[in-house]
């Protein structure tokens, strides 16, 4: 006869998923983040994956709807959130030109929160033992301190609140990059970071990766301040294959986390989110 587990055991399992709210403030150690590899799915121009994709998912093999030469260029550094109906609905609302600004911001904030949560999951944890209110010793994990966020202005600022909602005391730097009117090349106009950023893991926030030029310039600035590309996790909502490949070719050790890789990116995101469209 199966014996029901005591109530205390059920409570312990729920406690394991809670992260300390002050998880990102102190100085880091020497440990580098161990990044797990996930298969990614590319979407064709029609917005849906083909039958070969579905067969690939069933077999558990990598699901890449791009030519083999591009697959080799992308590699495991590009990670995609596992697709489900909730994420697909949020993507649809954001892409729909008839969506009201209120619904757009609400859906964007929800999608940002999902990306941020997964971004935090890519950072290192250590084992720990805690004592429950009943005196029980529980073996769990705790977040390693010493990380920071950096937003690429202006659209990247839309992701700051989602990061603060998860880690209330995290430090956030900013980079302002604009295209030169004459040369059309990305140019850095402003950069402000925590003074010890070179010792931290960096969550770089930029929601839309189109050409990748802006992010490439931002990463160069971080490198100038002593940050290693392997310590940078780029959080985005949407990416084009060209943008992702350009960034990874320039910085093979960087990690990109996004919800979708599609030939057409919703480049209106920043204007719609801040009401300047």
Image: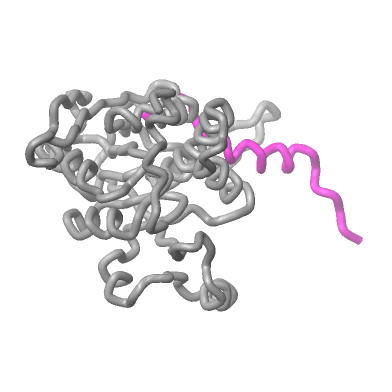
Is residue 41 visible in the rendered structure shown here? no
Of 206 and 149, nearer the camera is: 206
Residue at image position (19%, 42%) is: 219
Query: For the C terminus, which image quadrant?
Result: top left
- Is 224 included in the stretch rendered in magenta? no
- Is 4 included in the stretch rendered in magenta? yes
Of 135 and 126, nearer the camera is: 126
User: In this picture, which residue range is highlighted in magenta?
Assistant: 1-24
Residue at image position (55%, 56%) is: 83
Q: Position of residue 111 (x, y in %)?
A: 52, 40
Of 106 and 3, nearer the camera is: 106
Q: Is residue 33 above or below residue 172?
A: below
Give the main secondary structure, helix, strand or loop, of the magenta stretch. loop
- Colour scheme of the picture: one colour
Of 96 and 200, nearer the camera is: 96
Q: Position of residue 41 (x, y in %)?
A: 46, 64
Report which quarter residue 272 is drawn in: top left
Query: For the N terminus, which image quadrant?
Result: bottom right
Residue at image position (30%, 64%) is: 74
Q: Is residue 9 above or below residue 271?
A: below
Is residue 132 visible in the rendered structure shown here? yes
Count of all numbered marks drawn on residues in the image: 0
Q: Is residue 48 left or right of residue 201?
A: right
User: In this view, which residue lies farthest toward the right?
Assistant: 1
Q: Position of residue 108 (x, y in %)?
A: 50, 35
Report which quarter residue 222 is drawn in: top left
Q: Is residue 139 left or right of residue 145?
A: right
Residue at image position (31%, 25%) is: 172
Q: Position of residue 248 (x, y in %)?
A: 24, 57
């Amino acid at each position: 006869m199966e014996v029901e587990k005591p109530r205390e055991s059920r409570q312990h399992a729920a406690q394991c998923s809670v992260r300390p709210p002050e998880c990102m403030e102190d100085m880091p150690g020497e440990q580098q983040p161990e990044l797990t590899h996930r298969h990614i799915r590319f979407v064709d121009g029609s917005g849906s994956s083909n039958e070969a994709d579905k067969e690939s998912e069933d077999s558990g093999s990598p699901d890449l709807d791009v030519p083999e030469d591009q697959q080799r260029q992308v590699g495991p550094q590009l990670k995609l959130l596992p697709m489900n109906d909730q994420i697909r609905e949020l993507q649809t609302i954001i892409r729909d030109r008839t969506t009201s600004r209120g619904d757009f911001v609400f859906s964007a904030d929800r999608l940002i929160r999902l990306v941020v949560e997964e971004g935090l999951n890519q950072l290192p944890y250590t084992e720990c033992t805690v004592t429950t209110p009943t005196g029980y010793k529980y073996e769990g994990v705790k977040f390693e301190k010493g990380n920071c966020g950096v937003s690429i202005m202006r659209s990247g600022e839309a992701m700051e609140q989602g990061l603060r909602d998860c880690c209330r005391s995290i430090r956030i730097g900013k980079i302002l990059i604009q295209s030169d009117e004459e040369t059309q090349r990305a140019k850095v106009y402003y950069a402000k970071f925590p003074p010890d950023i070179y010792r931290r893991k960096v969550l770089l926030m930029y929601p839309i990766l189109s050409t990748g030029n802006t992010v490439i310039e931002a990463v160069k600035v971080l490198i100038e301040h002593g940050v290693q590309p392997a310590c940078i996790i780029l959080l985005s909502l949407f990416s084009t294959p060209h943008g992702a490949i350009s960034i990874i070719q320039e910085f093979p050790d960087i990690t990109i986390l996004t919800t979708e890789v599609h030939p057409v990116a919703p480049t209106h995101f920043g204007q719609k989110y801040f009401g300047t469209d």
